Amino acid sequence: MFVASNFVLAIARILELAINIYIWVIIARALISWVSPDPYNAIVRFLYRATEPVLRMVRRRMPMLAGGLDLSPMIVILVLYFMDWFLVSTLRDFALGLR
């Protein structure tokens, strides 16, 4: 059963890494939104394409605050941290129980 345990641990680590990378991509997107970036820049286009579907989904369900303050990146980051703490920890505990 150690093979299955190691496989589940590897999945948990990859999921944790993917969540952390996506959090940093969202942070970069939020920081770039404070300036007026070149919309034809490849990095800016990547950041918008990688984050806009998720942020748009949150924006549709959440009202805009006064002054046009967009809290959708913070909401998505909180959900990602929850997934990291809950899902990754659960996978690790499951993997250790398989040993």
Image (cartoon, rainbow, N blue to C red):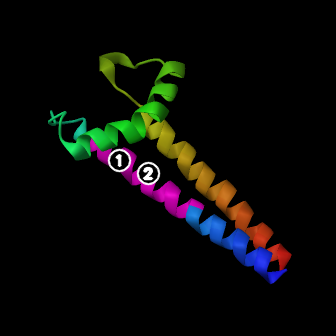
* Residue 21 location, quadrant: bottom left
Asked which secondary structure carries label 1, the reply is helix
**Residue 41, image x and y in percent?**
18, 41
Tell me, yes or no, whether the highlighted magenta stretch contains residue 68: no
Residue depicted at 32% across the width and 20% down the height: 68
Residue depicted at 57% across the width and 65% down the height: 14
Q: From the image, which quarter does the N terminus lie in? A: bottom right
**Residue 24, image x and y in percent?**
38, 53
Residue depicted at 30% across the width and 18% down the height: 67
Q: Specify the label residue 50 is tagged with.
A: none
Residues at circles 2 and 1 in contact by the CB criterion of under 8 Å = yes
**Residue 51, image x and y in percent?**
41, 39
**Region of the chain picked out in magenta, as a range:** 15-31
Please state which of residues 34 and 14 is positioned toward the viewer in this rendering. 14
Tell me, yes or no, whether the highlighted magenta stretch contains residue 23: yes
**Residue 76, image x and y in percent?**
50, 39
Q: Specify the label residue 27 is tagged with.
A: 1
Identified by mark 2, the residue type is Ile
Relative to residue 22, is residue 9 drawn left or right? right
* Residue 15 location, quadrant: bottom right
Asked which secondary structure carries label 2, the reply is helix
Relative to residue 92, is residue 27 drawn left or right? left
Identified by mark 1, the residue type is Ile
Mark 2–mark 1 Cα distance, whole angstroms, equals 6 Å
Relative to residue 31, is residue 91 drawn left or right? right
Residue located beneath label 2 in the image: 23
